[in-house]
Amino acid sequence: MIAEIQLELDRLEQEHDIKILYAVESGSRAWGFASTDSDWDVRYIYIHRLEWYLQIDDKKDSQEEMLPNDIDLAGWELKKALRLFRKSNPPMMEWLGSPIIYSENFSTAERLRELSKEYFSPKSCLYHYLSMADGNCKDYLTRELVPVKKYFYMLRPILACDWIAENGTMAPTEFDVLLNSQVSDSRVREEIDELLRRKSAGEELTQEPQNIVLSDFIKKKIEYYKEYVAQYGAFEQPPTQMLNE
């Protein structure tokens, strides 16, 4: 599949007359809890030829394409990516930390990684992850039956909040790093490990009564972080000049 993805990235460059600066896997495969039928969520940063930037009218600065074999392609033009990076956009930060890299032939991603400490906003990322966990909690932990995979879309953002609160840095993309560093309760760990085993075996769509241990853990964490994020003041955005360079 990796070879097929590489071919599709080459096709995009030819078809759209662009240059891909950086391409990675995002989503469950990058997080480390993909199931047997998970999509391939390929994300990339690209640039156009100089002429594209010399036009008066703004043009579309993103690309999306869904291909057979569950390959989901989505890219951001470099200026769009830099604007989002400047705002400490969590998905953009996660791309830079993806463990699955399809293309990194230029220095763009490495330079952004070097600047990430300057532009990282704990408040922005905490709100993002808290909103993700809280939204899924309201959608699924108010039901009698819960799909197995939905627990991970609450657990990962909660553990990311734990990491940010403890370390003051962007949370690792990989779920197992978060799990090993942030979960000390043996009961919670056992329940998560069992769900990981089942999800990897293809049981992610199985619906079953709520897991009380995990539901309580998630709900308590959400309430805690709703109060915790209130301590942060406004994010002082670093100068743009570093990104212009």
Image (spheres, rainbow, N blue to C red):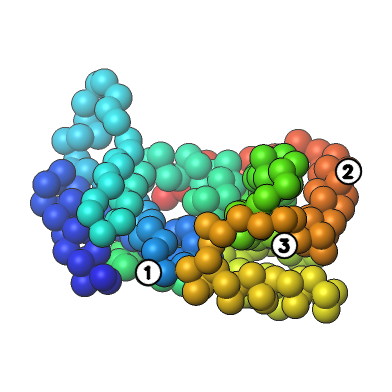
Q: Is residue 229 above or below residue 192?
A: above
Q: Is residue 95 above or below residue 104?
A: above
Q: Is residue 20 above or below residue 181?
A: above
Residue closer to the observer: 57 or 182: 182
The mark found on residue 172 in the picture is: none
- Give the structural element (helix, strand or loop) at label 1: strand
Of the image marks 2 and 3, the number of the one nearer the N terminus: 3
At which x and y percent is residue 15? 11, 47
- Give the structural element (helix, strand or loop) at label 2: helix
The mark found on residue 101 in the picture is: 1
Of the image marks 3 and 1, the number of the one nearer the N terminus: 1
The reply to whether residue 84 is visible in this rendering is: yes
The reply to whether residue 113 is visible in this rendering is: no
At which x and y percent is residue 154? 68, 54
Query: Disc 3 residue type?
Result: Leu
Query: Disc 2 residue type?
Result: Glu
Q: Which residue is mark 2?
A: 227
Q: Is residue 216 above or below residue 56?
A: below
Residue at the extreme top of the image, as rendered: 57
Q: Quadrant of the N terminus?
A: bottom left
Residue at 36% x, 60% y is 40
At which x and y percent is residue 82? 45, 45
Among the 4 quarters of the image, the one containing residue 157:
bottom right
Q: Crowding at label 3, few (<14), some or many (≥20) Cα neighbours within 10 Å?
A: many
At which x and y percent is residue 66? 28, 47
Query: Disc 1 residue type?
Result: Ile
The reply to whether the C-beta atoms of the residues labelled 2 and 3 are less than 8 Å apart is no
Q: Which residue is mark 3?
A: 159
In front of the other: label 3 or label 1?
3
- Give the structural element (helix, strand or loop) at label 3: helix
